[in-house]
Every structure is written in structure tokens, then in C-alpha cells.
Image (spheres, rainbow, N blue to C red):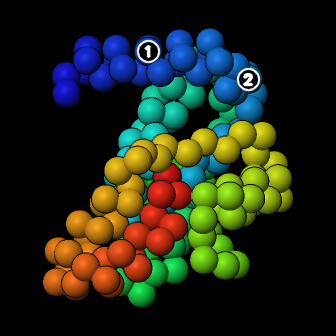
């Protein structure tokens, strides 16, 4: 993507964030990045980093959410997200939900983390395709349909 095209995307994102009042000047924003489809979450991080100045956001930090799934190598994926966050100069938190993650549980965990560390906003970048990404990831590792279905439990919380 050219710089002009990327700048256009950032401008549209900033306009939508302002239109919906999602952040205020001076807010500290914690971006939740789910697994296994952390690319979508990292894209959200990238957008916030690029848009932070225009929005007047004071700080952007990253929280990577472990799914606790035996079929995924969560620890390695979380470490990858942490490395990217640190390369961008962002604070990083690894989140291991207390129970099998579902959408409500993960949001509760992120809200608690945000409150504990003084972040006013929590941002998530997730899609309907997150469960599909979990299944494809499982198939790529050579597991069967039953195991892939089990891998998808809670996958829709990816951020």
C-alpha cells in the first residue's frame, strides 16, 4: 500500500473514531490483540499508532490475549506480538484469561487490565473470520475436523 493510500485509510479511521466519539484527546488506549489471528489486531495497533497524534491520544499500549488452546502455540504468538509492540515503542501486556475465553470474559479481562494501568479506552480489532482463522490454523497443523472445531471455541474473541 502506498503512503498516500495508507494516509487515506488513517484519515478515514480518524474521521469515524471522531464521529462516534470513541476516544477523547488525552485518552490512553489499550489495544487487545487476540490469537491466533493476531494480524487483524496488529493492524488495529498500527492504525492507532498512526492516528494517535491526530486524535490527541496520549498513549497506545497492546494486550495480547491467550486463547488457552492446546492446538495453538499461544506462548510463541504472544511473544511475537510483544516483540512488535516493543519495536513500536509501546507498552505490552500478556493476558491469560482466568477461564476459557469467550467474548464477554476477554472484554472483562481487558477492562480490568485497562483500569489497573490507567487506560481510559480498550480497542479491539476482530472479525467474523477469526473462528475461520482458528480452524484453518488447526488444519494447517494436520489436525482433524473434531480437533479443529474444539480449537475454534472462543476464537471469535480475537482482537
Q: Is residue 14 visible?
A: yes
Kindly identify the residue that appears in the image at 22 percent across and 84 percent down.
144
Q: Name the residue beneath numbered marker 1.
A: 12
Kindly identify the residue that appears in the image at 25 percent across and 18 percent down.
5
Residue 75 in the figure: left or right of residue 109: left
The location of residue 20, given as percent across then percent down, is 65, 18
Image quarter for residue 57?
top right
Residue 108 in the figure: left or right of residue 143: right
The location of residue 3, given as percent across then percent down, is 25, 21
Q: Name the residue beneath numbered marker 2.
A: 24
Kindly identify the residue that appears in the image at 23 percent across and 66 percent down.
136
Extreme-front residue of the structure: 146
In what quadrant of the picture does the N terminus appear? Answer: top left
Q: Is residue 44 above or below residue 9?
A: below
Q: Nearer the viewer, residue 146 or 79?
A: 146
Residue 60 in the figure: left or right of residue 159: right
Q: Is residue 51 above or below residue 87?
A: above
Amino acid at each position: 500500500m502506498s503512503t498516500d493510500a495508507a494516509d487515506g485509510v488513517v484519515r478515514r479511521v480518524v474521521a469515524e473514531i471522531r464521529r462516534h466519539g470513541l476516544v477523547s484527546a488525552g485518552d490512553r488506549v489499550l489495544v487487545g490483540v487476540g490469537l491466533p489471528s493476531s494480524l487483524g489486531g496488529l493492524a488495529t495497533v498500527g492504525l492507532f499508532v498512526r492516528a494517535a497524534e491526530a486524535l490527541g491520544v496520549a498513549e497506545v499500549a497492546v494486550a495480547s490475549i491467550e486463547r488457552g488452546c492446546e492446538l495453538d502455540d499461544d506462548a510463541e504468538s504472544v511473544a511475537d506480538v510483544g516483540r512488535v509492540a516493543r519495536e513500536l515503542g509501546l507498552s505490552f501486556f500478556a493476558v491469560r484469561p482466568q477461564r476459557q475465553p469467550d467474548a464477554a470474559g476477554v472484554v472483562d479481562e481487558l477492562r480490568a487490565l485497562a483500569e489497573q494501568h490507567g487506560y481510559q479506552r480498550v480497542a479491539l480489532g476482530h472479525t467474523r473470520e477469526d473462528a475461520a482463522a482458528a480452524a484453518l490454523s488447526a488444519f494447517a497443523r494436520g489436525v482433524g475436523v473434531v480437533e479443529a472445531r474444539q480449537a475454534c471455541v472462543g476464537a471469535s474473541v480475537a482482537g
